Amino acid sequence: MAPRYKSKSRKSKSSTHPAPPILHPHAAGIDVGAREVYVAVPPGADPRPVRCFDTFTADLLAVRDWLQACGVDSIALESTGVYWIPLFQILEAAGLEVVLVNARHCKNLPGRKTDVQDCQWLQYLHSVGLLRPSFRPADEVCAVRSILRHRDSLVQGAARCVSHLHKSLTQMNIQLQHVISDLTGVTGLAILEALLAGERDAVTLARLKDHRIKATREVIAKSLQGDWREEHLFTLRQSYELWKTHQQLITACDRQIESMLQKFDTRAEKDAALAPAKTSHKKPQKNEPQFLAREECFRVLGVDLTAVPGFQTPTVLVLVCELGPGFAEKFATAKHFGSWLGLCPDNRITGGKIYSAKTRDVKSRVATALRLAARSLHRAQNYFGDLYRRWKARLGGPKAITAMAHKLARVLWHLLKYRQEFDWKVFAREEEKMKRKKVARLFHMAESLNYQLVPKQ
């Protein structure tokens, strides 16, 4: 029996979906690369709606002129490394609205991927209003942020120099770094200066010991007996000179950051007084800013963030230079701020079942600073310290640090959003609740061991 085929005389009606409305009719999309940028404008704006330009300054200015000639007033620019920064600044200075978008939010559909298709896809998504701008602080904040990030790289370079100093001493079997805690302290620097000046007598070098060093002069002299080889002394000298150069550059960065922060508007009240600093350190820590950073941050923010548990002056300076004083107004709620930092669970739910709840991989210096602040609470005798230790026992160290960093982020947002000082009374109820749970747990443990707890009178 011959197979039966359906007649093709009638055409099947294809289901047509209405096109989304165009919200930005004069929108453009730009795909940025290291050597070339591809620009797409609306199809009717130019006979050639897609063009390629080099990344030289003259070509970027040509991009600006062509977009203005096409009547473009809003541009979607994908954040690619640091290649987008020159073009962004040129377009923004020309008065054009530049929407910096996350590459995760503008992923193209599966299929062939080219630079031409990428810029056209960006232009389409932006024209129908499917792209959200990424948070970028003001120009003055971006300027001081660049200096602070450069300072961090110098601090890391100075730390590598100290490692090279340790290596050179170890190769000569000089065990000084194992006798004193800090080779770049008062005693360590004095001994290094004398060594590089030609002094080799261990007893004479041991007399340079500071009174705060716990090791005796005999132990220090014993650690300074080794093989003074010329090649290792050469590397020791160069590492030491490079370390001193890093310290000079760090000091210059501090002066530059101070002068740039002084240009920020004052948000603190005229009669507001800064409370004395609450710190457990008897002296300033190494690599701290060498200016009145706490006072400047209080003037710029209007709130003393060092009153928050875990927040020290370097942490507050990172927040000011990375986010700016008015960043809380850019995020609708504290949850939005925590999500932007990548500190909240990123739930993946299908069919009512959670397949994944891990946090997103977000590279943020602010999130790193908040994690360090959360890690410093492991011995704090307050509500935040008890909460962190309870989370650590239940979730483990990494998850507890992330959870506490998320809580600190929410506290930070509320303080700056409503211009309020940190008040322990807000957490008094939660602290009392946690205390009752601890007492109930102790009574339950004693009862399980056939003991009876008697409250102290």
Image: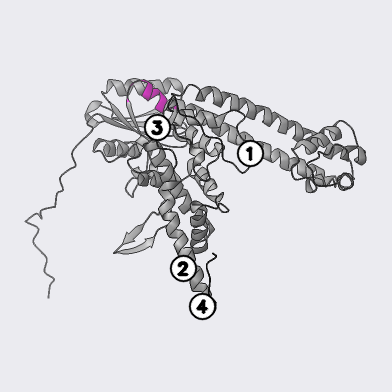
- How crowded pointer 1 is (Cα within 10 Å; few <14, some 14-19, many 20+) is rated as few
User: Label 1 vs label 4: CA separation?
Assistant: 52 Å
Q: Nearer the viewer, mark 1 or mark 3?
A: 3
Amino acid carrying mark 3 in the image: Gly
Q: Earlier in the sequence, mark 1 or mark 4?
A: 1
Which residues fall within the magenta stretch? 86-96
Q: Which residue is mark 2?
A: 440
- How crowded pointer 4 is (Cα within 10 Å; few <14, some 14-19, many 20+) is rated as few
Q: Nearer the viewer, mark 3 or mark 2?
A: 2
User: Label 2 vs label 4: CA separation?
Assistant: 12 Å
Q: Are marks 1 and 3 in contact (CB under 8 Å)?
A: no
Amino acid carrying mark 2 in the image: Ala
Q: Nearer the viewer, mark 1 or mark 2?
A: 2
Q: Earlier in the sequence, mark 3 or mark 2?
A: 3
Q: Is residue 272 above or below residue 167?
A: above
- Marker disc for residue 156: 1
So how many labels did they put on this image? 4
- The one nearer the camera, 169 or 1, is 169
Image quarter (top left, top right, bottom left or bottom right) of the C terminus: bottom right
Q: Nearer the viewer, mark 1 or mark 4?
A: 4
Q: Earlier in the sequence, mark 1 or mark 2?
A: 1
Amino acid carrying mark 1 in the image: Gln
Image coords of residue 40 (percent x, y): 31, 32
Q: Quadrant of residue 140?
A: top left
Q: Which residue is mark 3?
A: 326
Image quarter (top left, top right, bottom left or bottom right) of the N terminus: bottom left
Image coords of residue 128 (percent x, y): 23, 38
- The one nearer the camera, 444 or 266, is 444
Amino acid carrying mark 4 in the image: Ser
- The one nearer the camera, 340 or 403, is 403
